[in-house]
Image (cartoon, rainbow, N blue to C red):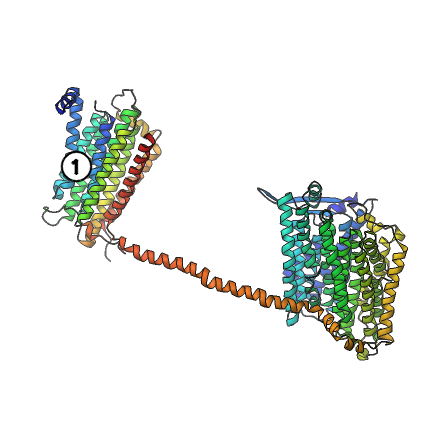
Amino acid sequence: MNLNDVVAAFVTGLTLSDVVFIVIAGITVLSALGVVLARNIVHSAVFLVITFLGVAAVYFQLNAGFLGLVQIMVYAGAISVLMIFAIMLVMDVEPQETNLFNKSVPTILTGGYVGVLFFAGMTGAIAFTKWPVSSVKAGDAGADLLAGLMLGKYVVPFEVAAILLLVAVVGAIILARGVEDK
Amino acid sequence: MILQNVLENAWIIPFLPFLAFALIGLIFHRWPKFSTAVSILSIAASFVFSVMVAMTVFSTAEGTVYEAGTRWLSMPGLQVDMGLLIDPLTAVMLLVVTTIALLVQIYSIGYMHGDPGIASYYAYQSLFAGSMLGLVVSNNFGQIFVFWELVGICSYFLIGFWFGRNSAKEAAKKAFITNRVGDFGFLLGILFLQIIFGTLNFNGLAVEIANYTNTGVLSMISILLFFGPIGKSAQFPLHVWLPDAMEGPTPVSALIHAATMVAAGVYLIARAIFIFNTSAEALMVIAVVGGFTALFAATIAIVQNDIKRILAFSTLSQLGYMVMAMGVGVMTAGMFHLMTHAFFKSLLFLGAGSVIHAMHDEQDIWKMGNLSKKMPITTWTFVIGALALSGIPPLSGFWSKDEILLGAFASGHMGLYVLGSFVAFLTAFYMFRLIFVAFFGSNTAGEHAHESPSVMTWPLIILAVISVFAGFVGSPLMNNAFGHYITYVGAQHHEASVSIMIVSAIIALAGIVLAYLVYQRKLVDYEAVKERFSGVYNLLYNKYYIDEFYALLIKYFVDGTAKVMEWFDLHVINGIVNGIAIFTGRAGTALKYTENGQVQTYALYMFAGIVVLLISALCAVFTAIA
Amino acid sequence: MIGLSHYLVLGTMLFSIGLFGVLSKRNAIAVLMCVELMLNAVNINFVAIEKFITPGTGLGQLFAIFVIVVAAAEVAVGLALVISIYRQKKSVNLNDFNLLKW
C-alpha cells in the first residue's frame, strides 16, 4: 500500500462534516499560530478573533449551538474588544514591532521545547486511551437544558460565578483607575 | 445503718485537711490564730471520723472491707481510676495518723508560739495530713503515687520551714532529691504493673497476680516497688536524708519523720504484700535491707550527741525493724510495730522538742543535764517512751518488737533474729545513754529550764498513756487481735514463745543497765573508751562516711559525666544544629540566584514539571502494557 | 470518521500553541491572549467529551460556560493589572517586570 493508496482511502472515507471539521480546525490552528507569531500586537488581536470564531464553529459542529453563540458574543465580542482597548491604552508608539519574542533565545527555545513535548505527550495519551464512547445520539443541547441545570442543580456554582464576575469587575476598575495622589 | 454511711463518707477524712490547707493558703493566712484553729479543728474532725470508721471496720469478726471507685480518666489502652479502700489496715493507719497529727498540731501551738510563719506552718501541716490520709485510703497504685509525692513535697516544705538557715535549705533539698531516686524505681514498678496487668487496683492486681506465673518478672516488679519504701522509709542506702531532715521544727520531725510519712513505705509494703509474697528473692532482699538498716543505724545512734539525731537514727533503726518484719513474712508484726512505734517515737520527739524549747534551741545532750527536776512531766513521759522503745514489758514496744523477733525466729531466719536482738540491746543502750546524760546528768546548764506550757505537756501525757497500753491490742494476752484483723492474706501469726519474750526483755534490761553503769554511775570512763577506739568512734560518729562517699560520687561521677555531656552538647549537638542552620543559609544564598523575577521563567518551571509528570505517567502506562 | 480523538488533538494543539506563546512572548497583553487560547482549548475538550461520552447531559457545556466566566474575569483583572503596571513602568514588556527578583 503506497502513499497514494493511503491518500485515496483517506479521501474516499471522508464525509462532508469531516471536511468541514478539517477546514475549521485548520483555520483555527493557523490563526492561533498567527496570534503567537505575529510581530504586530494588533495583528495578533485580529488573529485571536479569528481563532475564537473558529472555536465557535467547532462548537456548532459539536451540536453545542448555544455555547457557540456565547463564545462569539463573549470572546469574539467582549473580550477581544477589551484586549484592543487595553492595547490602545498602553501603546503610544507605532504598532509595528510591538509583539516580539522574549529577548533571551534560550527562553524561547525551552518554551518551544516544552510546548512540543507537551503536545507529543498529550497526543500519545489521547491515542493510547480507550475512550468509552457512548452510542447514544443526542441532538443539539438547547439553552433550555443549560438553563435548567444552571438554575436547578448547579444554582450555587452559578451564583458563585456571578459573585466572581462582580468582584472581578470591581477589582479591575480599582486596579485600572489607580491610586489617586493626594 | 449509720455506720455504713460512715464508710461511704470516709473520703471526708482526707478532704477536711485539704480544705483547711486551701482555706489557710488562700484566705486565712493573714490571721495566724485563726489559721491554727482551722487546721486543728479540721484534723480533729478527721480524727473523730477515723474513730467512727475504725469502729465500723472492727465491728465484725473479720473486719469490714469497703471499696468505692470512680474513673478518673480514660483513653484507649489506659484507664486511671481513683477510689477509696477501707479495710482494717487502712483503719489502723487512719487512727494512727489522725491521732498523732492532732496531738502534734495541738503541741505546735506551744512550740511554734511567736514564729512569724505560723499560718504557713499550719497550712503545710494540713496539706501533709490530707495527703497522708489520702495515701492511706487509696485503692490503687496510681493514686497512692500521687499522694506519695504530695507527702514528699510537704516533707520538703516543712524540713525547709526555717529556710533562712542554710542547713535547713540543704536538708530539704537533700530529702527531696534522695527521695526522687527511690521514687523513680517505684514509678517504674507501677508502670510495669500497669503494662503487664492492665490495672493498678489492689484487689484487681491480687486476682491477676494469683494467675501469673512468671516469677522473674514478679521479682523484678517487687524489687522496683521496694525502691519506694527504701527512699521514703529511709532504708540503706537512701537513709542519708532522714538525719538531716531534723533541721525542720521538732513537731514536724515527730509527725512526718518519725511517725507517719516515713512509715508510708512500710505501709506500702504491707498494702502490696501480695506482690512481694510471690517472690522469695524479693522478700529476702527486703529482710536483709531492713535488718542491715536496723543494725547500721543503731550503731550510729550510740555515738551521736544531738538529741534529735539520736532519735532520727533510732527511727531509721526501727523502720529497718518493720521492713525486716515484712521480709521475714510477718507483715502483721511489722504493721503492729509501725503503730506502736508511731506513738512512742512521736512521744519521744515531742519530748525532745519540749526539752529543746526549754533549753532555747540547744540540742546537744552533753549541754543538758539534770532536767528531771525542772521538767518532771517531760522527763517521765520521755522515760516511758524510751522504755517502750527499748521493749520493756508490758509497754507497747515490747509486744510489737517481740512479735517481729518471734517471726524472724519461727520462720527460720536465725541470723536476723540474732541481729534483731542485738539491735534491741543497742536501742536500749543508746536511749538510756540519752536519758542519763540529758535528764539525769550532772551538767547544770539546764538550771534555767522550766516545764513547757500545758498545751505541750498534755499531748505528751496522752501519748505516754497510749504508748503504755497500745501494745495490748496485739499481744498474746488479747489473742493477737491486731494481727487477726490486719491479716487479709492468710494467718501470719506464730505461736507465742515465752522464752523469746524473756530473752528480749533481758536483753533490753541489759542495755539499760549498761547505760546506767556507764553514764550514771560512771563505772567505765567513756572518754577513755572513746580514745581507745577512736577509729571505730570516728567511723560511727561520721555515719560510716556515707555522706562523704556520696559527695565524692557526685563530685567525680556525676560532675564528670556532666562535664562530658556539656562538651558533647556544646560541640557535637550545637555543631549539628548550627551546621544545619549554616547549610540552610548557604543553600538559600546559592539558590536565590535562580530567582530572576521573570514570571515566564516561573511558568516555564511549572509547565516543565507538568510535562515531566505527563511523560513519566505515559512511561508507566507503556511499561504496564508491555 | 472524525471522532473524539481528533477534537482532543485539536484542543491539544491550541493549548500547546498557547503554552508556547505564554512562555516566549515579551508583551504582557500577548501573553494574556495566549492564556485565552489555552482556555479555549480546554473548552473544546469539555464540549467534545460531553458529545462523545455523556451525550445529552449538557454538563460539558455547562462547565465550559463556567470556564468562560472565569476567563472573562481573568481577562478583566489581568488587563487592569497590565495597565496599572504600565503606569508605573511605562512598559508592558515582561522582561522589565522583575519585582520578584532577589
Viewer-closest of B365 and B147: B365
Query: Is A74 on the left or on the right of B55, as rendered?
Result: left
Q: To which chain does the residue with label 1 belong?
A: A
Viewer-closest of A133 and B15: A133
**Circle 1: residue type:** Ala
Q: Is residue A152 visible?
A: yes
In the image, residue A28 lies at what x, y percent? 16, 33
Q: Is residue B394 visible?
A: no
- Label 1 Cα neighbours within 10 Å, binned few <14 / some 14-19 / many ≥20: many
In the image, residue B248 lies at what x, y percent? 69, 67
In the image, residue B165 lies at what x, y percent? 65, 72
In the image, residue B501 lies at what x, y percent? 88, 58
Query: Is B204 on the left or on the right of B499, as rendered?
Result: left
Viewer-closest of A150 and B395: B395
Q: Quadrant of the N terminus of chain B?
A: top right
Which residue position holds label 1? A32
Number of residue marks: 1
Q: Quadrant of the C terminus of chain B?
A: top left
Tell me where residue A62 sits by quadrant. top left
Quick check: B485 above or below B575? above
Q: Secondary structure at mark 1?
A: helix
Tell me where residue B285 sits by quadrant. bottom right
